[in-house]
Amino acid sequence: ASRLSSSAPAVFHSILHPQISAAENRTNLGLARAEPRRMVKAMAGCPAKMGFRMPAEWEPHEQCWMGWPERPDNWREHAEPARKTFERTAMAISKFEPVTICASAKQYPRVHELMEHQPNIRVVEMSMNDSWFRDTGPTFITREGGSDIGLAEQTIAGIDWEFNAWGGLGGGCFDDWSLDRSIAKKIVEIERIPRFAHTMVLEGGSIHVDGEGTCITTEECLLNPNRNPHMTKLEIENELKDFLGVTKIIWIPLGLHGDEDTNGHVDNLCCFIKPGVILLSWTDDENDPQYEISVKALSALTQAVDAKGRQIEVVKIHVPGPLYITKEEGEGVLATGHAVPRVPGKRLAASYVNFYPANGGIIAPAFGDKKRDEEAREVLQKVFPDHEVSLVASKFRHPCCSCELKQAVTVGCKRKGSMSARLSEGVP
């Protein structure tokens, strides 16, 4: 699982020897690894009581999982512009850590050929309704090794939340999410790690943690009646604490303006950049609906303390100038009656907060607003001085890729003792 150089394909052809074992071949290639982990499937109980916690995004990743866009009723021009953006995103992330791209049976041959000579990207066939693995993939949690639960070497597990396409039939993005409900299960089985199944509807982009016991989320999303109408706010808090290993939940009223698809996911509005410090989407334009949303968020955050008793510090980062779905873009999306229509003139939820923190790199979206794009680069470089900041330009403006880079990915935590492996939580 070590990172491979650009000359890796030639090395494979010249060093592999058919008369020796696979383990010896791996050693010759510098790919020696521990024996495969014992398969542990469903786990019951409270992860927090077992010592599990959800790590912060900036902690080391083992790999990044990404879905591959396809459905024409959500992506314009049969997803061709989206695929180019996903390709650029995968390439950018793979400079810092390995990437696994999951593609449907129809798309697999094309994606495999596209990535065949990328040594840090692998392609896996997987059925899905859409490509937002941050929301549909597992929430990875980690723990120190121990024998108390009979898993002495097991330091990683995945939470498989219930998924209803961001609102179900009463407001979701499409009317069939049966394949997406199995994505988390498939990923944890491929990785051979335990799975904690949960009946609560939750998407990965709706929560953000600092790795030290604090979680931020929005009332707009988690308290929306199209998610868990049978649960109270306190009950939702308790489930987050039991499964994420946090002790403090900070509630923010609303998500980013225009983020109607997800009902205001927190990761498009603000995120932790280190314990006690949060990066917040901001505008100085008091006539912009985003202004009031950001002011309310600022108030909620600055009045809060985290799980360690620290007063929350806020760093502002401006949103780009307003972006809207053009007539051409709207007409390029196929109307099937099975997905939310993309209406021309609708404002997009564009935010630089939805960047992807790789191992040593920050991958953020660029929106063609030269002033704000460059300003965002400077802010991100300042708050992540030890990372290389890369902006991924998008030739199309879709409210789920160019604006929500992280929605496309789910991160695999770094395993204890995984040598130099850096096989991440995937831009959703």
Image (cartoon, rainbow, N blue to C red):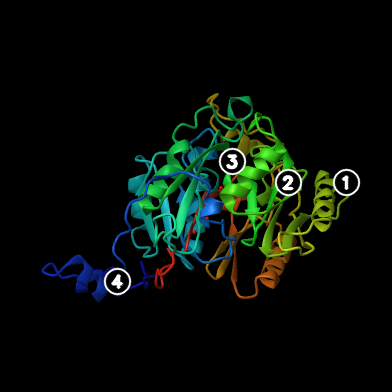
Instruction: Locate residue 340 relative to residue 93 in the image: left or right.
Output: right
Say what amino acid the circle numbered 3 marks. Answer: Leu
Residue placed at 85% from the left, 51% from the top? Answer: 295
* Identity, as a three-letter code, of the amino acid under mark 4: Ala
Residue beneath label 3, please?
Answer: 202
- Estimate the spatial distance between the alpha carbons at disc 4 and disc 3, rounded to whole Å: 37 Å
Which mark lies nearer to you, 2 or 3?
3
Judged by depth in the image, the label closer to the viewer, 2 or 4, is: 4
Label 1 sits on residue? 287
Q: Amino acid at mark 2?
A: Leu
**Residue closest to the eye, 374 or 101:** 101
Of 368 and 356, nearer the camera is: 356
Q: Which residue is mark 4?
A: 32
Q: Residue furthest left?
A: 19
Identify residue type, mark 1. Asn
Please identify the quarter of the rendering in which residue 164 is found. top right
**Given this view, does label 1 or label 4 mark the residue nearer the observer?**
4
Whether the residues at callouts 2 and 4 have beta carbons within 8 Å, the answer is no
Residue tagged 2: 256
